[in-house]
Image (cartoon, rainbow, N blue to C red):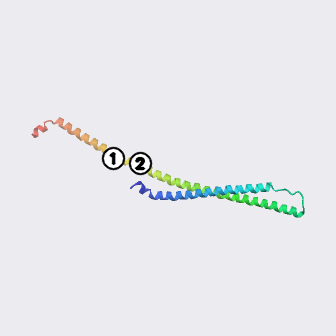
Amino acid sequence: MKAADEDRGLRAVRRVREVRESDSRFGLSVALGSVRDRDAEVQRARARLETAEGFALGSVADFRSHVDRLSGLVALESVATTRAQASRTVAAEAQRRWQQDRRQVRVVDLLLERRALARAEERARREQAQLDDLASQGWLRAREQAHQRSQQQTNPTTEETTR
């Protein structure tokens, strides 16, 4: 049986796992992009909060408006921080899945390599057995020829008596 036929099923498994690994790598890429975007949102929210004007003087309504505006900026920063943390969690899970999928592809590759190595070893054993058989046959022929020559040398008259 050919190696391609023997490994057909395993190669199909590898293709499926390779597609899964590719999908998870794409998912990781998207998740990392989301982390960058969410971290940028946090930085913008912090910058807005840090550059907000302080309350100098004014009416109670002005003070209340200022407090509401600062509360809104703090809430925006808090929401941005929470979203950034959630996106980091998603990215960590995406990385874990990608690494797992990558390991699964590598496992199939290792199995294919082991099968190829086992086939090569078996082929080498068969070749060695054939070479041993040929050497044995050659040795037997040489021994038979040497035996015949030695008999001819010990009985040179055998030909003469048959004539």
Q: Amino acid at mark 1?
A: Gln
Gap between marks 2 and 1 measured at Cα: 14 Å
**Left-right relation of 159 to 30:** left
Q: Amino acid at mark 2?
A: Glu
Q: Which residue is mark 2?
A: 121
Q: Nearer the viewer, residue 62 or 94?
A: 62
Residue 72 position, x and y percent, is 79, 62
Q: Nearer the viewer, residue 53 or 111?
A: 53
User: Are there few (<14), some (14-19), or many (20+) residues within 10 Å of tag 1?
Assistant: few
Task: Describe the element under mark 1 as helix, strand or loop.
Answer: helix
147 relative to 13, above or below: above
The reply to whether callout 2 and callout 1 are in contact (CB within 8 Å) is no
Q: Nearer the viewer, residue 95 or 116?
A: 95
- Does residue 16 appear anywhere in the picture? yes
**Left-right relation of 89 to 72:** left
Residue drawn at x 39%, y 49% is: 123
Question: In the drawing, what numbered circle is on residue 106?
Answer: none
Q: Of the two numbered discs 2 and 1 on the same chain, state the one appearing first in sequence.
A: 2
User: Are there few (<14), some (14-19), or many (20+) residues within 10 Å of tag 2?
Assistant: few
Residue drawn at x 25%, y 40% is: 143
**Left-right relation of 135 to 58:** left
Residue 134 position, x and y percent, is 30, 44
Q: Which residue is mark 1?
A: 130
For the C terminus, the image quarter is top left
